[in-house]
Image: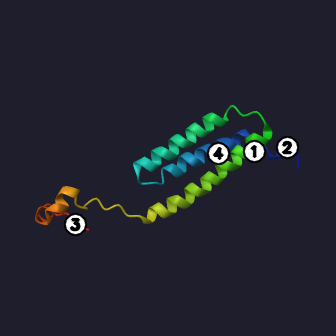
Amino acid sequence: MTVAASTPSRAQTLSLFRSLLRIARDFSDYNIRYYIKQRTIDGFRHNSKLTDPSAISSAFSDGKSQLEVAKRQAVVYSFVVCTPNIAAASDMLDPERARRKGLKLI
C-alpha cells in the first residue's frame, strides 16, 4: 500500500467534516452541540496546514474515531430525558410554593 493511497481525498475529508457537524445536531443540549461544532471547526482549521501525508492520514483517522465516539454519545444522550418541570432550588426550599406552580419535586 502506498502512502498516496492511504491519504484521504478532499471529498472524504469534507464528508467527515459534514458528518461531525451533522452529528452535533443530534444532541438536545445546546452546550454540547456548540462544543462539538466548535471543536470540529477548530480541529479542521488547525489541521488544514498539514502537508505530510502520514500526518494527514493520522488526523483523518483521529477525526473518524471522534465521529464514532460522538455517534455513541448521541445515542447515550438520547436516553437522558431533561424534565423542564423540575423545581428550581428556591422552590425546593418551599414545597408548597412548588406545588402551586405545578412543579415536580425530585
In this rendering, is residue 91 above or below 31? below
Q: CA distance from mark 1 to mark 2?
A: 9 Å
**Disc 4 residue type (three-letter):** Ser
Residue 15 placement (x, y as % from top left): 64, 45
Mark 1 or 2, nearer chain start: 2
Callout 1: SS: helix
Residue 95 placement (x, y as % from top left): 14, 66
Residue that sits furthest to the top in the current view: 49
Q: CA distance from mark 4 to mark 3?
A: 44 Å
Q: Residue at x 75, y 44 (%)?
A: 57
Mark 2 or 3, nearer chain start: 2
User: How many other residues sit within 10 Å of disc 2, few (<14), some (14-19) or many (≥20)?
Assistant: few
Q: Residue at x 52, y 59 (%)?
A: 73
Marks 2/4 in contact by CB < 8 Å: the verdict is no
Residue located beneath label 4 in the image? 15
**Disc 2 residue type (three-letter):** Val
Mark 1 or 4, nearer chain start: 4
Residue located beneath label 2 in the image? 3
Instruction: Give left or right: position of 44 versus 53.
Output: left
Callout 4: SS: helix
Q: Nearer the viewer, residue 43 or 27?
A: 43
**Disc 3 residue type (three-letter):** Lys
Foreground: disc 1 or disc 4: 1
Callout 3: SS: loop
Foreground: disc 4 or disc 3: 3
Q: Residue at x 60, y 52 (%)?
A: 67
Residue that sits furthest to the bottom in the current view: 106
Instruction: Give left or right: position of 6 versus 63.
Output: right
Residue 57's mark? 1
Q: CA distance from mark 1 to mark 3?
A: 51 Å
Residue located beneath label 3 in the image? 104
User: How many other residues sit within 10 Å of disc 4, few (<14), some (14-19) or many (≥20)?
Assistant: few
